[in-house]
Amino acid sequence: MEQKEILKNVIKSFSNYYEKQKSFKRVFLNEPVMSKAIEVFDTEMNEMVDHIFDLIGIPNEEYSDKYDKSNWTRDVCINLIEIAAKNEKYIEPAIELISDWVNLGDYTSKIESHTWFRYYQLLDEHITGYKNWHEEQLEKEKGKGKSKTA
């Protein structure tokens, strides 16, 4: 199965899960044991995504220091999946961004402010023309490189 098809199925699974989770929470709102069950299922869903990322080849990055324990690439990809699962309009851009995870830092550079960015903004930018902006940036970089060597 192609990587993009796998990601689409994962997003659909999350979407179905979130729909069932809403109903479950509504019915068992005042049941603490059932709330714990939801946490267990959330953990299972996230473990499934980790296995998918292993299959796709997204590395499980080492921590840069003892205070920074996040795996940036996987964290961004997980958040993109969760957002796409909750809003159908973001499915295709999320799949494209995750499929090109090697260049994820390039995609986020347009909207990044220091070490954070808004995921919805990333997906909207990808829908509305990130590719054009990115090509312009590459052309500018090439122009700077040529002027230095000339």
Image (cartoon, rainbow, N blue to C red):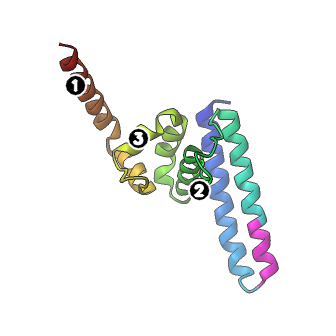
Tag 1 secondary structure: helix
Furthest toward the right, the residue is: 33
Residue 59, picture quadrant: top right
Q: Residue at x 54, y 35 (%)?
A: 99
Q: Secondary structure at mark 3?
A: helix
- Element at badge 2? loop
Answer whether residue 38 is magenta in the image.
Answer: yes
Q: Earlier in the sequence, mark 3 or mark 2?
A: 2
The residue singled out by tag 3 in the image is 107
Q: CA distance from mark 3 to mark 2?
A: 25 Å
Where residue 135 appears, as percent x and y from the top left, is 30, 30
Residue under numbered circle 1? 144
Q: Are marks 1 and 3 in contact (CB under 8 Å)?
A: no
As drawn, 108 above or below 40: above
Q: Amino acid at mark 1?
A: Lys
- Residue 115 or 93: which is nearer the viewer? 115
Residue of label 2:
67
Residue 114 is a magenta residue: no
